Image (spheres, grey):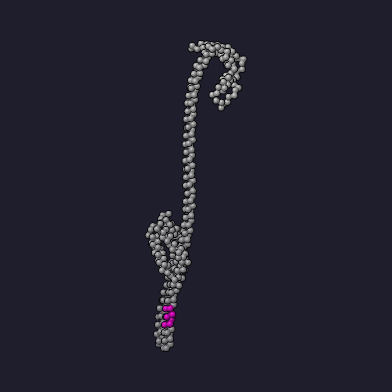
Amino acid sequence: MRDETPHIEGLYLPTITWDPRMPDKPYKPHWKIVESTCLIYPQVINHWVDHAFPPVEVSYVKGQDSGPLLDSTLADAVAGVKRIAEIKRCLGQDNRELQKSRHAVQQMLDDIQRRDSLLEAAKARESRLLAEKEKAKEDLKRVTSNLAEEHVVWAQDIQEKERVIAHALKVQVELERKAVLEAEKEHHHSLMAEMEDTQAKLDQANQGCDEVVVQRSQLQRDLDVEKSRRAKSENAMNHALAEAQELSVQLVALKDERSWWVSHGVTSCFEFLRRSPHFSSLLDDMATTAYETGQHDGMHAAYFECGRLELVTDELRSATASASTCMAETLSAVANDPLPKF
């Protein structure tokens, strides 16, 4: 290598020209200094100075005189100041880049935090929706159970209504039969009385011919009366048969009406009663009274059995009176209040 010293701004800056035949490899000092070594001891500093620079630079510095060495040192000092300024500029730029990176990282952290908050809100909303879903399931289960219970009560009421209608028809038929029997019995008694009178008259007719002739004419008149009466009886019987046929037609109409009541009327009535709070409370009171006193035929038989044994208490009479009052109020309300439209 050779030494060239150009004049730059009043300073002599040494310029080093390297031999191109020398290998261009980075210098790796062989020293004992490590990362934890402190440069405060003289021996450590001397060891660092001896091994910090390449041997070529060390030999170059040793081969210079004081003047060029001083110029080289000043040039290195000036270059060091420039390097410090450049390092400061680079550090400032790196600091600005670092601030931008920190700002970007902070924005990313804010986005992550915002997304976490949105995720927490979504989780809370999901939990609330799941709770509402469970509550809806419980409400649906409760409503289904209530509908099943109301359906059972409605079926029991329909059965009770059919039983009451059948019993009323049976009582009506029995009363009609008893009325017919009473009429026939009275007619039989009247005929027996007339026959006894006729027998007495015949006995008296045996006492004399004149009386026989008179009684014969009387009997003839009585026979005519009896014939007319028998004709009237036959007419009455025919009229009764006509009335019976008419009653049969009415019975068929009543059966049709009963079928309509069973299929539509009772359903509408009980639907109206079910939707009305007043009638619902009355039905609840009646159901409670029926449950406490007895159900269906058991209550009827128990009441008459207690009456036969003279065991009917005042509480039972008051309960019966209150039940009759409730039934009368219910029937009055059903007759007066309009049915709902379906």
Which residue is most to the front? 42
- The image position of residue 36, as x and y in percent, is 56, 27
Decide whether the magenta segment is chiefly helix, strand or loop: helix
Relative side of 59 to 321, left or right: right
- The image position of residue 62, as x and y in percent, is 57, 14
Can residue 324 be seen in this snapshot? no
Q: Nearer the viewer, residue 328 or 121?
A: 121
Q: Nearer the viewer, residue 15 or 52?
A: 52
Q: Quadrant of residue 214?
A: bottom left
The residue sitting at 58% across, 26% down in the picture is: 34
Which residue is most to the left? 336
Relative side of 50 to 260, left or right: right
- The image position of residue 138, as x and y in percent, is 48, 51
Q: In this view, does 135 lie above or below 328?
A: above
Q: Quadrant of residue 51?
A: top right
Quarter that holds the C terminus: bottom left
Q: Which of 75 and 333 is in front in this view?
A: 75
Q: In this view, does 310 lie above or below 152?
A: below
Can residue 134 be seen in this snapshot? yes
212 drawn magenta: no
Q: Which of 14 and 277 is in front in this view?
A: 14
The residue sitting at 47% across, 32% down in the picture is: 106
- The image position of residue 227, as x and y in percent, is 42, 77
> What span is colored magenta in the figure?
189-197
The residue sitting at 49% across, 18% down in the picture is: 81
193 drawn magenta: yes
